Amino acid sequence: MHRRPLLGMLEHYTTHYPGEVETVQRIERLVHTSADCFKRTCRPGHITGSAWVLSHDRRHCLLVHHRKLNRWLQPGGHADGQADIAEVALREVREESGLQDLELVGSEEHLMPLDIDVHCIPARTDTSGHVVEDAHEHHDIRFLVVAAAGQKLILSDESHDLRWFTHDEVLEATDEESVLRMLRKAGPLGGEPV
């Protein structure tokens, strides 16, 4: 079953973060009941992949100012049918930042997400008020990634801005709990605990 690797990751994640079992179970229900869970057409939601990207020295993290949602978030996006969700996260980082030399943190045998989250994406309408995309859920699987030094950031058309943030700058830029949760779990180094 193409969903088995993700289910294994979620099981492993639960042993490390037992306080997040409700969110894990919600994602597991989607994966078990929807063979098309990796496709953006799956409703009530679908699996997405994203990454908390740290600089080579782990002193900065990368955030993008998302064009559609108008807030600072980690790079990420739709699986578009790809079941290897870690590869989805890496692809999205490359597309949204221009960074190419990236390393997933964790062993290949026991690759575990840094974080998981289920959140609602609001409906989008065109200029005449017609619904272009209905409201739905993203069941986001988030990985810790370290970028090699000396790479240039390239802004994609999906974002207003992207840049490296220190720990304290993240606190100034957002109060988004899921972003602050990743900050608490992985850094960057420096600053006061959140």
Image (tube, helix red, strand yellow):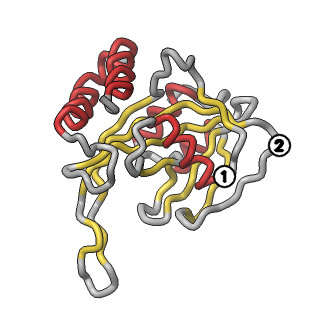
Position of 194 with respect to 99 (left or right) is left
Position of 7 with respect to 166 (left or right) is left
Tell me residue 48's x, y (percent): 39, 44
Under circle 1, the secondary element is: strand
Position of 89 with respect to 191 (left or right) is left
Tell me residue 35's x, y (percent): 23, 40
Viewer-nearest residue: 154 or 20: 154
Viewer-nearest residue: 48 or 184: 48
Vertical position of residue 152 compared to residue 144: above or below: below
Residue 108 falls in image quadrant: top right
Mark 2 or 1: in front is: 2
In the image, what residue type sits under mark 1?
Answer: Arg
User: CA gap, disc 2 to disc 1?
Assistant: 14 Å
Viewer-nearest residue: 191 or 20: 20
Residue receiving disc 1: 163
User: Please, which residue is most extreme toward the bottom here?
Assistant: 128
Under circle 2, the secondary element is: loop
Q: Residue at x 29, y 46 (%)?
A: 46
Tell me residue 112's x, y (percent): 46, 22
What mark, if any, has residue 184 been given in the picture? none
Q: Residues within 10 Å of mark 1 (few under 14, many from 20)?
A: some
Residue 52 falls in image quadrant: top right
Q: Residue at x 49, y 42 (%)?
A: 88
In the image, what residue type sits under mark 2?
Answer: Gly
Residue receiving disc 2: 150
Vertical position of residue 154 compared to residue 181: above or below: below
Q: Residue at x 25, y 49 (%)?
A: 45
Which of pointers 2 and 1 lies earlier in the amino acid sequence? Answer: 2
